[in-house]
Amino acid sequence: MHAFVTVGSTRFDALVKHALSDVVIDVLRTKGYSDIVVQCGNSDFDRSVYTLEGDTWTRNLEGEGSIEVWKFKPTLQQEYERADLVISHAGSGTILDVLRLKKPIIVVPNPTLLDNHQEELASALADTGHVKAASPWPIIAQFLDSIPTGWVGLDSGTGNGKYLPLPHDRPGSIWTIGLDRSRNLLSIARTAGGNNITREVVWGDVLGWQWRHGAFDYAISIATIHHLSTPERRKLAVQDDLSKRAVPQNERSESHGQDVFVPWVLSSQPQPQPKQKGKTKQGRTPTESVQQIAQDTQNVQDEPSKIFHRYYHMFARGELRELVCEAAKDLHLHIGPPDVGVTQGIDIVQDGWERSNYYVELRRWEFR
Amino acid sequence: MVRLITHNLLACHAKGCTTNNFPLQLKDVTIELREAEFNPDFVSGFLSRLEWTALVNAAKELGDTSLPPELPDMVDDDLLKNLHHVLLEIHIDEGSMICPNCGHSYPISNGIPNMLLAEHEIG
């Protein structure tokens, strides 16, 4: 299959660099995209491994496939038509052209362009499920922006650690510690954000209690608790985070723990796979669905393909908020802002729907 | 990576182990020193939530005796720099962390601590 990467009429060094990186090329080839064409505009990239023929830099990939890089063409329509996947800057023209052809598109807003509304456009179209947007979810970026310098927090289910380097404009002002069950992902997360900065990551279970009391000032949990198979386990995960809040020992009378939970809700209905019934460890109710992710064993042709089973719970509207409230009630926490006669509670700062996901932001408070 | 910033937060969570489960004791560790950018505002902000004695003792076990046994009332720049070094520049690459209460051992390998428990150890 054929993947087309486009940066539009200006330059977008980061997108071109990543699109041509071994990691991305490997992923694309694993997914079946062996021919990769990159329209690079005026972007810089390492040309040393390419052969220049006319206006086009080319490179043959080991085994099958090739990469082709060129700057501009009068029209990209032919490229869109030929492509099975488009990876694009968030230019409105490109997005609309590709959507009209009903081709899948991954949109990467260019953060170096000011006032061109790429981020807003990408977010709006991601909200409606038309595109996949590749930047951190604004709601999480804003939350981490709001965290005061000196706080230490937890990213429960950190995955590849994309939130660990935030906020970008105050590097090193807060430390988010990444927890995940996948050691492979943690080995990526520990260098998330690059710049030779090592992140703190811990291999563990989101249902584990591996922290001293009051260890963290804030916590985020993104696309994680929907993997837990029963309502009890999901509640436990929320309670686990609620009870890890720091209660300050100093003069302030109100504690400052904050949480954001963003479980994923898939925008398309996953297909239940009857043949794997009973294979997952945890029990599940009939309303919950299972998605099967089949993945070819990378680069090993003789081996049969492996199938990975992953569990997804589909959150319904209002369910996340309800889950949080139930979890809080069990911990004898008042729900609402700080109130006379109540010693501790959680305040729901905001909840909603963004980029096809439900989220809820909480503030944990306590009077001493 | 496990650095003392994380060690200062981790506690044993094996079944039934709820008291005296912090701090975990470092055992057979190999360390590597790597420079990290000094952010005095972060260090002074984090200070009030540190478990001071646990940090001082863990630093000593790793051969760093730059921290005073009690947190002084006046925190000067030198102390912040020493704290920065202890919290963020000493990387424990290999070894294990042992619970002082139940003796459970949490291995560290390639800089990643393994806090997973077996099914029968989950409380």
Image (cartoon, rainbow, N blue to C red):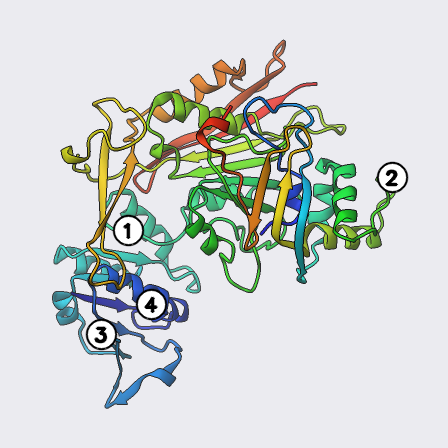
Q: Is residue A122 left or right of residue B89?
A: left
Which element type, helix, strand or loop, lies under badge 2?
loop
The residue shown at (45%, 48%) is A183
In 3D space, how far apart are the residues under numbered discs 3 and 4 (Cα atoms)?
19 Å
- Residue B73's disc number: 2
Please provide percent x and percent y for residue A70: 27, 80
Please provide percent x and percent y for residue A142: 49, 44
User: Which amino acid lies under the numbered mark 2 shown in the image of this protein?
Assistant: Asp
Q: Which chain letter goes with mark 4? A: A
User: Which amino acid lies under the numbered mark 3 shown in the image of this protein?
Assistant: Gly
* Residue corresponding to mark 1: A132
Q: Earlier in the sequence, mark 1 or mark 3?
A: 3
Q: Earlier in the sequence, mark 3 or mark 4?
A: 4
Please provide percent x and percent y for residue A213: 63, 28
- Give above or below for A163 relative to A77: above
Could you say which quadrant of the image residue A117 lies in? bottom left
> Label 1: few (<14), some or many (≥20) within 10 Å?
some
Q: Is residue A220 visible?
A: yes
Which element type, helix, strand or loop, lies under badge 4?
helix
The residue shown at (61%, 12%) is A342
Determine if marks 3 and 4 fall on one subunit.
Answer: yes
Please say if the residues under marks 2 and 3 sit with CB atoms less than 8 Å apart: no
In 3D space, how far apart are the residues under numbered discs 2 and 3 (Cα atoms)?
66 Å
User: Which amino acid lies under the numbered mark 1 shown in the image of this protein?
Assistant: Lys
> Label 2: few (<14), some or many (≥20) within 10 Å?
few
Please provide percent x and percent y for residue A223: 37, 39
Q: Is residue B108 left or right of residue B86?
A: left
- Residue A19's disc number: 4
Q: Which chain letter goes with mark 1? A: A
